[in-house]
C-alpha cells in the first residue's frame, strides 16, 4: 500500500502570529534554496510560502491601518516622512 504524502510542517494550519509565519517562511526559503527539498515537495512548499507571504502582508497592512499619530489632541493617519 502506498504511503500517504506528507506535507511541510504547518502546511494546513494558519500561523499563530506574524512572527511565527515569518519564521516558517524563512525556514521554507532556506530549504528551497539549499536544494535539499525533493522535487515532489517544491510545489507544495511554494504554495505554503505564498500563503505565508499573503498572511504576513495582510498583517502588515492591518497594522499600518491602525498606526495613528497624536497631533494637537486629534488622531490622524500616520504618514511616513
Image: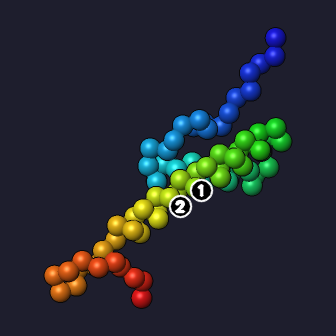
What residue is rendered at 22% in x and 85% in y? Answer: 71
Relative horizontal placement of residue 21, taking residue 31 as reference (left or right)? left
- 47 over 61 or under it: above or below: above
Residue 31 at x, y percent in the picture: 70, 48
Residue 17 at x, y percent in the picture: 44, 49
Please name whichever residue, 62 or 17, is drawn nearer the observer in this view of the structure.
62
Relative horizontal placement of residue 15, taking residue 49 as reference (left or right)? left
Please name whichever residue, 21 or 31, is drawn nearer the observer in this view of the structure.
21
Please name whichever residue, 18 or 67, is drawn nearer the observer in this view of the structure.
67
Q: Quadrant of residue 68?
A: bottom left
Is residue 27 visible in the rendered structure shown here? no
Please name whichever residue, 30 or 55, is drawn nearer the observer in this view of the structure.
55
What residue is rendered at 75% in x and 55% in y? Answer: 33
Determine the CA span between mark 1 and mark 2.
Answer: 6 Å
- 9 over 25 or under it: above or below: above
Residue 3 at x, y percent in the picture: 77, 18
- Colour scheme of this structure image? rainbow
What residue is rendered at 59% in x and 35% in y? Answer: 12
Residue 62 at x, y percent in the picture: 42, 62
User: In this figure, which residue is indicated by the disc labeled 1?
Assistant: 53
Relative horizontal placement of residue 3, taking residue 74 as reference (left or right)? right
User: In this figure, which residue is indicated by the disc labeled 2?
Assistant: 57
Name the outermost residue toward the left: 73
Count of numbered marks = 2
Amino acid at each position: 500500500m502506498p504511503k500517504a504524502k506528507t506535507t511541510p510542517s504547518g502546511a494546513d494550519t494558519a500561523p499563530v502570529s506574524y512572527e511565527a509565519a515569518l519564521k516558517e517562511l524563512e525556514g521554507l526559503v532556506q530549504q528551497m534554496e539549499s536544494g535539499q527539498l525533493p522535487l515532489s515537495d517544491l510545489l507544495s512548499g511554494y504554495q505554503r510560502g505564498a500563503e505565508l507571504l499573503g498572511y504576513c502582508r495582510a498583517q502588515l497592512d492591518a497594522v499600518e491601518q491602525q498606526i495613528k499619530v497624536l497631533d494637537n489632541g486629534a488622531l490622524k493617519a500616520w504618514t511616513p516622512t
